[in-house]
Each structure stands twice: as structure tokens, then as C-alpha cells.
Image (cartoon, helix red, strand yellow):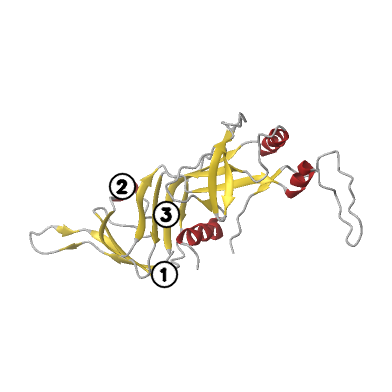
């Protein structure tokens, strides 16, 4: 049985091709260095702390991420109504019924995608760092990052959970991350992790690591293995022709 975070990380990767921060409010920064433990990134240090300088290519076009597949939950809107003559207007709202553990809703607006500018140069720099014993072969580095202006994330940690939300300005079920909506929790059933209109999260990112060919070269492994015979012990003295880094993607099965 999958953990809740497995479903969340895998679901967002399948949807957008980005890894997800866990917990969702964990701060991730470009140049963070760490390891992959299952589907999770565990930070250990940073390029800056290791003395590796890099330039940032900042995003300049805002994006909206809204997981609208509705897998594992149902949304029912509720219109604002007047309760009676001379009585106040009842707030508009909606109810979200989660049908399975690990089901989640992810809405993030005013998002910008930042990247490390020259990954080729960084790869060569990290090769030298490894040779100085300042870099581990299983380390990965955050090379792409999504900065969100406002994020709403709802994750069901139990079966048959339910959340009722309300807002003075009305609620757009396709964008629950709107800051000015003033969304609040009216009622809840079950265990739900909630981030409502949270500002400044870094919910999505991508990682790079040494390519397999470069790992073998750095380790001084022989270039070929003769099955049924002897292993060729000659070691290439020149580095591989391909780029040093490749995408680091955990097993999503």
C-alpha cells in the first residue's frame, strides 16, 4: 500500500513532469544538494556551501497549475443565498468529498519557473569537485524550481474525508489558490492536510545527477565486460562525449 506522500509525489510527477516538495511547505532552492530516498528529496547541502557559483535563469511568464483531473475527490459548489428578509447573506462555498486515502487537490497560481543557467559548466565543475572528494556520486542537485505566488493544497490522509469551504467573494473551483478569495474552513471530517492560499511556496522542482557513463568513468570502471571470458581492464583516459548531468527521476512505480 502506498504512503500518502507517494501518491502525492507520483501524481504530480505524472501530471506535470516535476517532483514535489514533501511536506508541501518544505522550502526548496535552486542549487540545493541532497539524495533521493524513494520518491523524496533529502537536502544535505547546497552548491553555494560547496563553493560552486552559478547563474539563475529566472522565469518571466506566470503559470497556473491546477490539478483538474478530479481523481479521488468530488467538488460540489454552493451559491451564496439570502437567508431571509433583513438577514445577512450566507457565504458562498463548496464541499470536497475525498473518496480515497492519498487523494489530493493542487492549485498554484502566479508561478515562475527558475533554472540554473549553464548546466554544462556546472556538470564539469562537479566532476572536478568529485575528484577533490568534495562531491558524492549519489548526490543530486536542484536545477529547476517552481516559485508559487499562492498555493492551495488539500491531501486526504484518511478514507471518506470531507472538507467544506466558504468565502465572502465566492469560490472558483478551478482556482482555489486565489489570495483575495478569503477562503476559510467551514467544516471538516477526517484527516486532511491543508494549505489554503499559502504564499511563497516552492512546491515543484527538478533534479540532475551524473550520467551513468560519467559515473563509470569517474570510478575507473573498464569500458566492456566479456561474458564467459575475462574482463577488459583498460580504462578510458578521456571523459565520455555526452553531457555530464542528466535528469534524476525516482522510481514512480
Give the Cα distance between marks 3 and 2.
15 Å
User: Disc 2 designates what residue?
Assistant: 180
Q: Is 151 above or below relative to 121? A: below
Residue found 37% across the figure and 56% down from its top: 193
Give the Cα distance between marks 3 and 1.
19 Å
Residue found 66% across the figure and 41% down from its top: 136
Q: What is the x, y in percent for residue 200?
A: 41, 42
Give the Cα distance between marks 1 and 2.
30 Å
User: Disc 3 designates what residue?
Assistant: 107
Q: What is the x, y in percent for residue 77?
A: 30, 65
Q: Secondary structure at mark 3?
A: strand
State yes or no: discs 3 and 2 in contact (Cβ < 8 Å).
no
Q: Which is more N-terminal, label 2 or label 1? A: 1
Q: Is 217 above or below relative to 85? A: above
User: Disc 1 designates what residue?
Assistant: 100
Farthest residue, direction left: 86
Q: Nearer the viewer, mark 3 or mark 1?
A: 1
- Badge 3 crowding class, 10 Å Cα cut-off, few under 14, some 14 to 19, many 20 or more, is many
Residue 209 numbered tag = none
Q: Which is more N-terminal, label 1 or label 3? A: 1
Q: Nearer the viewer, mark 3 or mark 2?
A: 3
| Quarter of the rendering occupied by the C terminus | bottom right
Q: What is the x, y in percent for residue 111?
A: 47, 45
Amino acid at each position: 500500500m502506498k504512503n500518502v506522500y507517494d501518491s502525492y509525489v507520483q501524481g504530480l510527477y505524472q501530471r506535470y513532469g516535476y517532483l514535489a516538495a514533501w511536506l508541501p511547505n518544505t522550502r526548496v532552492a535552486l542549487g540545493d544538494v541532497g539524495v533521493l530516498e524513494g520518491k523524496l528529496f533529502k537536502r544535505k547541502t547546497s552548491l553555494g556551501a560547496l563553493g560552486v557559483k552559478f547563474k539563475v535563469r529566472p522565469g518571466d511568464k506566470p503559470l497556473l497549475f491546477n490539478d483538474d483531473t478530479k481523481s479521488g475527490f468530488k467538488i460540489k459548489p454552493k451559491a451564496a443565498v439570502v437567508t431571509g428578509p433583513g438577514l445577512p447573506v450566507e457565504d458562498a462555498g463548496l464541499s470536497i468529498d475525498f473518496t480515497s486515502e492519498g487523494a489530493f487537490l493542487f492549485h498554484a497560481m502566479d508561478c515562475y519557473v527558475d533554472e540554473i543557467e549553464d548546466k554544462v559548466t556546472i556538470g564539469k565543475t562537479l566532476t572536478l569537485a568529485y575528484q577533490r572528494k568534495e562531491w558524492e556520486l549519489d548526490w543530486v542537485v536542484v536545477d529547476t524550481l517552481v516559485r508559487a505566488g499562492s498555493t492551495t493544497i488539500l491531501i486526504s490522509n484518511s478514507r471518506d474525508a470531507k472538507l467544506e469551504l466558504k468565502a465572502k467573494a465566492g469560490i472558483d473551483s478551478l482556482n482555489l489558490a486565489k489570495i483575495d478569495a478569503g477562503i476559510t474552513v467551514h467544516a471538516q471530517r477526517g484527516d486532511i492536510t491543508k494549505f489554503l492560499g499559502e504564499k511563497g511556496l516552492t512546491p515543484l522542482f527538478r533534479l540532475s545527477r551524473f550520467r551513468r557513463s560519467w559515473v563509470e568513468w569517474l570510478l575507473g570502471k573498464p569500458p566492456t565486460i566479456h561474458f564467459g571470458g575475462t574482463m577488459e581492464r583498460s580504462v578510458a583516459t578521456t571523459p565520455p562525449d555526452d553531457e555530464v548531468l542528466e535528469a534524476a527521476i525516482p522510481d514512480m512505480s
